[in-house]
Image (cartoon, helix red, strand yellow):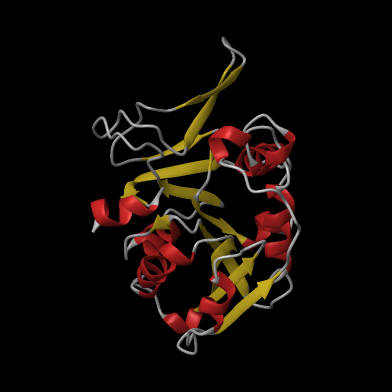
Amino acid sequence: MSIIVGCPIRNRKWTLLKYLEAIYNIDYPKKDLLICFLVNDSTDGTLKYLNSLDFRQYNLAIVKEKNYNFESCERELGRNTDKFLHFAQVRNDWISLFKDIPNVTHVFSIDSDVLVPKNSLRKLLKNNVDICSALVINSDKKNGYGKDITNIFNFSKERECYENLMEYPKKSLFECDVTGSCILYTKKVIDSIQYQAHPLGEDFGFCCASHQRGFKVWVDTTIETKHVMKKEDLGRIF
């Protein structure tokens, strides 16, 4: 069994040391992990830094560059605009780098600003579901566990929109409509669907397409990640 670990990455040299340390510390045999990054439109030396590293302890390492000349945009500013729709293309191009590699059973997609705990992969695998994410807090001001902006969304039929779950089951595995940022999915998922452009982001398009193909989407809040949203967070977290 081989598991892909990585993400598309852009101008994240400043997080890479801690990000890769977290991946290195994952409690799972490195011979069964395949590292994969798609560097896109980076100007900060991300590609050079990745190419300078020794990944020989892993089964395989893929570091590729593809530049799209997409304008940089902040997620919050880009939502509901055309600028935000290209992220699905980048994700699908990343998947194409490993989609035909034999014996891959899972993909552990970890955004480059998310630091995973060492037991994250084993716990996600133990859930034995096709799509499952860890908990990621997406706010600077933490209001206390269970009251934060999260990577968990459900669709409200009453309001006809997606709502962020700021109150959620603690230390629990439960089904949701949309999640992302730090997500494990089985190979049969990406053999069945692609990331889709969506005004709210590629994770919404991916989860909507998953539901349409009969896959359930889960989140495990027993797995809490660290979210490095800006450079100052490195000092706060460490």
Q: State which quarter of the image contains the N terminus.
A: bottom right
Residue 145, compared with residue 34, is above or below; it is: above
Find residue 123 and report its horizontal and vertical position in percent.
37, 58
Residue 35, compared with residue 75, is above or below; it is: below
Left or right: residue 139 compared with residue 238: right
**In the image, what residue occupies the spot 33% across and 40% down?**
172
As rendered, which of 107 and 61 lies closer to the eye?
61
Q: Quadrant of residue 75?
A: top right
**In the image, what residue occupies the spot 67% across and 59% down?**
188
Find residue 117 and report its horizontal and vertical position in percent.
32, 60
Left or right: residue 173 compared with residue 195: left
Q: Quadrant of residue 25?
A: bottom left
**Residue 225 in view:** no
**In the image, what residue occupies the spot 62% across and 36% down?**
78
As rendered, which of 67 and 122 lies closer to the eye?
67
Find residue 195 and report its horizontal and vertical position in percent.
70, 48
Left or right: residue 223 compared with residue 35: left
As rendered, which of 166 and 76 lies closer to the eye?
76
